[in-house]
Image: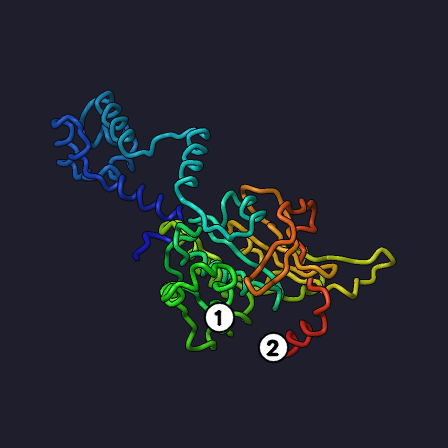
């Protein structure tokens, strides 16, 4: 697939260039005035609009009324039509209704997302190692390849596995436990698994350099990648789900990010020791680029999946646990969260392990 640009603005710029390069003799001007434009080497709408009316009057040797009439005609054809806020809102609602969703089959979460993971935008999963991000992605892969009459998309999946965590055995286990009536049919498991294409990088050297490089070059690379991914989701009208790891913040660095976990005790200024303070690893620019953000965390002996960012729902948290059939919500109603708590990332009981992993990098 060839994309015209990395985002919607690129598409609009391309449309404006296309309109500006329209030939004068194709704009429906009176033949007499169109011939004068051509004779003076004013070939395109851009050529005409680059000059003032007085300059055109002198160059074309015609009256001001003729110049004004011609320029109004050219401008009307070349300039995009005005749109009201109401029209834009109606178009967005109409496009979203046509776009569709990939149901997660987590009832409360699907209701909050108006049907599931939306097409045409980027959805992000953020959380510490071992919290359930891979389990969530495996289930989504199955649901995307599941037949429509069972609530799936009957589609194909590209699963980019940069950490080599994809497990075909676990995928089949989730499928068998979640959809026994399908997976027990002869050949169905093979057919669905055949629709999931796994891509693994052959070399991690460039990836590692990108991960540890600091400054503008790293942010520029991330910016290019997320722009491309957003364009792919939008122009192809497909759901795209990304995972993002976490890292410990340094000093007040977390205040710069939308994921901040600045949690302190009430006595003095002593950090709470049972909770690690984490931020999303890819930083604030990446965070702003995603449309839906789900934070997976562990707190107070429970795991939560938090709808931290969504244009169609208030911030909600759903307790969950992981079973043989994948992630299961403990309560479909969700807990509405206010303030910075929805953006924090807790990793209870994993401080030592997490710090050890960070020291090993």
Local crowd at mark 1 within 10 Å, few (<14), some, or many (≥20)?
Answer: some
In this view, the residue in front, 58 or 238, is 238
The percent position of residue 325, horizontal first and vertical second, equals: 55, 62
Q: How crowded is mark 2: few (under 14 residues within 10 Å), some or many (20 or more)?
A: few
Image quadrant in which you'd find residue 112: top right
Outermost residue toward the bottom?
360
Residue 253 in sight from this viewpoint: no
The residue carrying mark 1 is 166
Q: Please say if the residues under marks 2 and 1 sit with CB atoms less than 8 Å apart.
A: no
Residue on which disc 2 sits: 361
Q: Residue at x 61, y 68 (%)?
A: 130
Question: Which quarter of the figure is the C terminus placed in?
Answer: bottom right
Tag 1 secondary structure = loop
As rendered, which of 294 and 221 lies closer to the eye?
A: 294
Q: What element carries label 2?
A: loop
Q: Work out whether mark 2 precedes mark 1 in sequence or the reverse, and give the earlier one.
A: 1
Looking at the picture, how far across and down is residue 210, in whole percent?
50, 70
């Amino acid at each position: 697939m060839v994309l015209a640009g990395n985002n919607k603005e690129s598409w609009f710029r391309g449309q404006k260039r296309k309109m500006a390069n329209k030939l004068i003799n194709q704009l429906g001007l009176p033949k007499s005035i169109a011939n004068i434009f051509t004779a003076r080497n004013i070939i395109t709408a851009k050529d005409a609009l680059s000059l003032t009316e007085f300059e055109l009057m002198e160059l074309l040797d015609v009256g001001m009324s003729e110049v004004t009439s011609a320029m109004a005609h050219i401008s009307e054809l070349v300039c995009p039509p005005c749109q009201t806020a109401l029209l834009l809102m109606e178009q967005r609602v109409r496009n979203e209704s046509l776009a569709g969703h990939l149901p997660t089959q987590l009832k409360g979460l699907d209701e909050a997302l108006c049907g599931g993971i939306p097409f045409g935008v980027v959805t992000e999963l953020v959380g510490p190692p071992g919290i359930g991000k891979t389990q969530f992605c495996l289930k989504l892969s199955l649901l995307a390849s599941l037949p429509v009459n069972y609530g799936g998309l009957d589609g194909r999946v590209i699963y980019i596995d940069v950490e080599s965590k994809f497990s075909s055995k676990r995928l089949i286990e989730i499928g068998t436990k979640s959809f026994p009536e399908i997976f027990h049919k002869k050949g169905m498991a093979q057919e669905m698994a055949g629709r999931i294409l796994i891509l693994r990088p052959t070399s991690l050297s460039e990836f590692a350099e990108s991960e540890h490089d600091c400054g503008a070059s790293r942010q520029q690379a991330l910016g290019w990648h997320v722009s491309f991914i957003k364009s792919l989701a939008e122009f192809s009208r497909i759901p795209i789900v990304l995972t993002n790891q976490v890292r410990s913040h340094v000093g007040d660095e977390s205040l710069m990010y939308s994921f901040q976990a600045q949690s302190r005790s009430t006595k003095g200024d002593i950090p709470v020791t049972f909770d690690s303070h984490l931020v999303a690893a890819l930083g604030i620019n990446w965070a702003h680029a995603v449309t839906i953000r789900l934070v997976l965390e562990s707190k107070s002996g429970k795991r939560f999946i938090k709808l931290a960012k969504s244009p169609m729902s208030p911030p909600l948290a759903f307790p969950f646990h992981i079973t043989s059939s994948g992630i299961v919500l403990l309560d479909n109603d969700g807990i509405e969260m206010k303030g910075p708590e929805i953006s924090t990332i807790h990793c209870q009981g994993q401080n030592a392990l997490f710090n050890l992993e960070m020291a090993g990098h």
